[in-house]
Image (cartoon, helix red, strand yellow):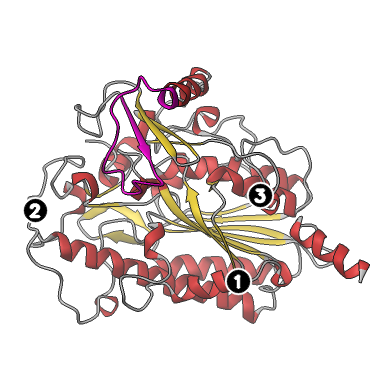
């Protein structure tokens, strides 16, 4: 009995009791909103594959990103450091000498692999012995923008699993959908007609309140309901191929002993607060909340749901602890130890850290750090929310003079006072970023 209990404790601490090689698969799904995973609007779930994974592990209902931009968010995910520590504040630049998880694991003899599906993640981190950064398709409406479709992403990732099945490995797999343009195969759209009535104009820019962003525009499609339907179909589309990758783990006998983590880099605005079909410009919850599913080996914590406040910087230390890698200094906490320790504030930001936010319990303060390029100039300097009473952030208190606002603002300013020098943009990034929608 004592031996079995010791083994369970070790599993929860991510240290195995057998000589089974340590294996981790980290899957990130670009622009996936937390509220589109699981039961959905009185209809069949969009994500049966992710739902099955959740039944085998832990589903965190209060997980947030640390940045609402892809490259910036993934940098924090894979280093365990907040953006002001990595110096990556948007979709360009390089990590430089910041310690990153794959390099740490590779030094310990772990096979490391990355399969990325869009340009902003190309060359993100050192330490991946295998990095597949080639693209085999282009997005509709953006013929100069290459991507991997989920079919190709899954195929490349499966090949890595086949090659390294006998040993320890860390594989990061990035899927591009449901990032826009929302162009899933027609078979995923179903027969249901789109909701009609909310007709929008197409903007000439990529960020304009109340309009369809230029990079998102689909031919002769102006109804907001149709875009939402296409986004949901895109979720259904990517879930199918995530399921195929998880099946490959099962078929190879790797699933039971592996640590599998699925999350997203950020959410997506679908009309909330007057912004449509974009991300990166705001820190409202529709862009900040992300799904986070963790399947531990041997069914540990199987079928659990946790409302613990977690964030993307918690993922890297979780994986490091699983491999028994000591001395990995991060801003996060290993998820297996989430039940211990005092509560703490969490942090997130928008593109170039124009907006920064701190969440402490139910209190959330948004601070406009300076002039804005990506949101409207009228955004207040400070906006305070009570997420317990107002989860949709409809009733912000624009008075920063109260004691809660003053305390949270002081903490935000203290963190950003130590902001690392932002890494310079690479000239070759500019055209890609404009096509993706991050440069007006």
Foreground pick, 342 / 258: 342
Q: Quadrant of residue 344?
A: top right
- Asked if marks 2 and 1 touch (Cβ < 8 Å), the reply is no
- Note whether 74 is above or below 142 in the view shown: above
Looking at the rendered image, the quarter that the N terminus falls into is bottom right
Provide the residue designation for mark 1. Answer: 303
Q: Which residue is drawn at the image coordinates 44% and 68% (left, top)?
A: 152
Provide the residue designation for mark 3. Answer: 338
> Picture coordinates of residue 159 (x, y %)?
58, 69
- Note whether 83 is above or below 201 in the view shown: above
Mark 2–mark 3 distance (CA, rounded to whole Å): 44 Å
- Asked if marks 1 and 3 touch (Cβ < 8 Å), the reply is no
Q: Earlier in the sequence, mark 2 or mark 3?
A: 2
- Note whether 289 is above or below 332 in the view shown: below
Taking the image as shown, residue 418 lies to the left or right of residue 393, namely: right
Magenta stretch containing residue 387, yes or no? yes
Q: Quadrant of residue 395?
A: top left
Dot 1 crowding, Cα within 10 Å, few <14, some 14–19, many 20+: some
Q: Which mark is residue 320?
A: none
Q: Can the viewer see residue 428?
A: no
Q: Which residues are drawn in magenta?
A: 382-405
Q: Earlier in the sequence, mark 1 or mark 3?
A: 1
> Picture coordinates of residue 360 (x, y %)?
50, 37
Provide the residue designation for mark 2. Answer: 200
Taking the image as shown, residue 23 lies to the left or right of residue 265, namely: right
Foreground pick, 327 / 300: 300
User: What secondary structure prevails in the magenta region?
Assistant: loop
> Picture coordinates of residue 16 (x, y %)?
81, 62
């Amino acid at each position: 009995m004592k031996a079995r209990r010791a083994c369970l404790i070790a599993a929860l601490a991510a240290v195995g009791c057998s000589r089974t090689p340590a294996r981790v698969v980290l899957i990130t799904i670009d622009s996936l909103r937390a509220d589109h995973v699981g039961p959905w609007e009185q209809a069949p779930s969009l994500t049966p594959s992710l739902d099955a994974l959740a039944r085998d592990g832990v589903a965190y209902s209060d997980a947030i990103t640390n940045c609402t931009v892809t490259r910036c968010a993934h940098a924090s995910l894979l280093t365990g450091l907040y953006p002001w520590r990595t110096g990556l504040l948007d979709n360009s630049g390089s990590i430089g000498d910041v310690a990153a998880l794959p390099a740490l694991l590779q030094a310990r003899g772990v096979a490391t692999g990355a399969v990325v599906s869009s340009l902003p993640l190309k060359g993100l981190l050192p330490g991946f012995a295998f990095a597949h950064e080639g693209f085999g398709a282009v997005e509709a409406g953006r013929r100069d923008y290459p991507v991997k479709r989920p079919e190709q992403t899954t195929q490349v990732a499966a090949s890595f699993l086949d090659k390294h099945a006998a040993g320890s490995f860390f594989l990061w797999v990035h899927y591009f959908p449901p990032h826009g343009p929302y162009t899933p195969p027609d078979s995923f759209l179903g027969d249901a007609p789109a909701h009609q009535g909310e007709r929008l104009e197409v903007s000439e820019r990529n960020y304009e309140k109340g309009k369809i962003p230029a990079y998102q525009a689909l031919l002769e499609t102006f109804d907001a309901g149709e875009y939402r339907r296409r986004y949901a179909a895109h979720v259904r589309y990517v879930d199918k191929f995530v399921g195929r990758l998880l099946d490959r783990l099962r078929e190879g006998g790797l699933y039971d002993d592996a640590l599998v983590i699925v999350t997203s880099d950020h959410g997506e605005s679908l009309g909330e607060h007057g912004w449509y079909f974009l991300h990166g410009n705001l820190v409202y919850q529709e862009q900040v909340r992300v799904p986070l599913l963790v399947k531990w080996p041997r069914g540990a914590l199987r079928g659990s749901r946790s409302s613990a406040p977690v964030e993307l910087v918690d993922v890297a230390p979780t994986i490091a602890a699983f491999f028994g890698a000591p001395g990995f200094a991060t801003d996060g906490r290993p998820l297996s130890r989430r039940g211990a320790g005092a509560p703490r504030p969490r942090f997130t930001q928008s593109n170039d850290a124009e907006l920064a936010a701190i969440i402490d319990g139910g209190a959330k303060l948004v601070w406009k750090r300076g002039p804005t390029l990506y949101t409207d100039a009228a955004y207040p300097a400070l906006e305070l929310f009570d997420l317990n009473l107002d989860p949709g952030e409809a009733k912000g208190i624009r008075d920063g003079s109260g004691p809660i606002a003053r305390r949270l603002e002081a903490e935000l300013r203290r963190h950003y006072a130590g902001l690392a020098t932002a890494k310079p943009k690479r000239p070759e990034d500019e055209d890609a970023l404009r096509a993706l929608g991050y440069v007006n």
